[in-house]
Amino acid sequence: MRTIRRVTRRDVLSVALAFGCKSAFARKRLVTLEQWMLARVQDRDSAWKSSVRQIEAQDASIQAWVEIAPQISPHQGKLSRIPFGVKDIIETRGLKTEYGSPVYKGRMGTFDADIVHEFRTRGAVLLGKTQTAAFAMRDPAPTRNPRDLAHSPGGSSSGSAAAVAADMVPIAIGTQTAGSVIRPASYCGVTGFKPSFGLFSLKGVLPYAPSLDTVGFFTHRPADTLMLWEALGRSSSAHDELIVGMPDPMPKSESEMTAAMQSAVNVLRQAKIALRPIDIAAMLTRLNEAQRTIMYFEGARTHEFRVREYGDRLGYMAEMVRNGLQIRPGEYEAAKNYVQECKTQMTSIYHSTPVVMVPAATGPAPVGIAATGDASMNSPWTALGTPAISIPMPVRSGLPLGLQLTAAHGDDGRLLQAAVRIHQTLHGR
C-alpha cells in the first residue's frame, strides 16, 4: 500500500525522474495547486509531462483513471500548463465519456462541456478522464482509496477524489447530486468544494436530477480551492469576524467522526472562534427525505428512455427509474415546497451565523468498494443549493475524516475564506 504524505509549501518532495533515461535527475515535484501556481510555466510543463508515466504505473492499484491522454490547451492564463482530471460523466472532445457504464464502453466525446472549456481557456492541461460510479449513481467504480486500498474512495466522483489524494493531479472536477463531492473528499483526506447551485454551467454534464446537479472541485487543501476559485475569475473577500453555527444536537455519526468533531470544536474554541448552537436537527432529517424524493422523481424521468432501450443492463439506474416513476407528482411538489421553506429559514440562520459546521460524512471510508457510503451529511445542503466544502481534519491514526462547512447561496467566496482560516487553525498553522 502506498503511503500518501501531505506536502506543504515549505516541504516539497524531491523525486528522481528517469522515465526511459539511463540517468535520473532530481527535480522538485509539484503537488498542491499552490505549488503549481507558484512555479514558472516552463517548470509546470516539465512537471506534468514527467509525471504521466509515474501516474500510469501508480494507477494500476488505485484505478482512478478511465483514460490518461493529455490535451494541451493553446490558451494562456492563470492555469497554464497545470493538469486536471475530469469525471467521466462530463463531455470532453476526443476523450472517452462512457458514464462509468459498460453499456457505453468506447463512447467518445465530441465536444467539451462548459466547465472543461472554462479550464481550457485558462490554459489548463486536461490530463484525462476519472472514474465514476455508473451514471453518477450507485454502481461503484473500480477505484480504491489511496489512503488504504482496502477501503472505498466514496462516490460517485470516486476517481476525481482518488487522483488528487494520490497526488496525481492538483485539481479534479466532479459532480454532486447528493454527496458525490463532499463525501469522497472526506474519505480520501482532501478538500472537496461544491459551489452554489447554478453558479457553474452544467452544459455537457450528464444529468441526474436537474434541480440538484452541481459541478464540484477537488484540491488538496482549502487554500488551493481558494486559489482555483480566484483563477477562474471568481471573487472572494475576507471577513474579520468568523461566527460558526453548529447544529445542536449534531447529526448522528460514527464514533471516529464524533470524536474528531469534538476535538475540532475544542481547538476552534481555544482559538477564540465564535461557535453558536443552531436548532436545525429536525430540518436536516426532513431535508434528507425531501432530497431523495426530488432526486428519484427527476432522475426517473430524466433517464426513463435509457431504461426502455437497455433495461437491466443499466444496473442500479434501472431500479432507480422504476422506483422513481412510482413517486406521485404531488409528493414531488411537497418535497420541493419543503425545501423552499427551509431555504427561507436558513437564510435567516446564515444572517446570524454566516458559516454552519457539520461532519462531511457519517464516518471514515467503508471497507471494500461494493458501496460508496452514506450521503446523509451532504444531501440536505445539496437540496438547499448552498455552497459546501470538506476540510481534512487532523487524524492521528486511521482513515481520513472531513469537516463540512456551508454558507448561504452565493456566499461561496466568504465560505472559502472561512475554510482556509479554520483549516489553518485545526492544523496549527
Image: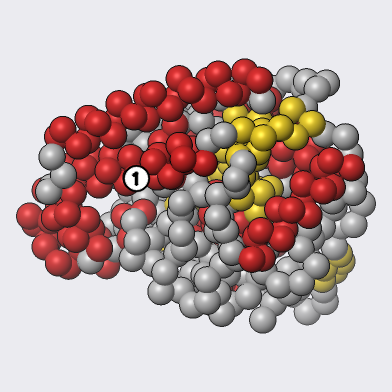
Circle count:
1
Question: Residue 46, position in %: x, y?
Answer: 73, 54
Q: Residue at x 61, y 33 (%)?
A: 278
Examine the image and state in which quarter residue 209 appears: top left
Relative to residue 202, is residue 417 drawn left or right?
right
SS for tag 1?
Answer: helix
The answer to whether 111 appears left or right of 298 in the picture is: right
Callout 1 amino acid = Glu
Coordinates of residue 99 in the picture (x, y in percent) = 32, 56
Q: Is residue 138 above or below residue 39?
A: below
Identified at 72% across, 58% down, the residue is 260
Does residue 256 sit above or below 2 in this rendering? above
Write the residue at 71% across / 72% down.
Answer: 398
Left or right, 260 with reference to 344: right
| Residue behind mark 1 | 289
Residue 91 shows up from this direction? no
Quadrant of the snapshot with the C terminus = top right
Extreme residue toward the left, this view: 308
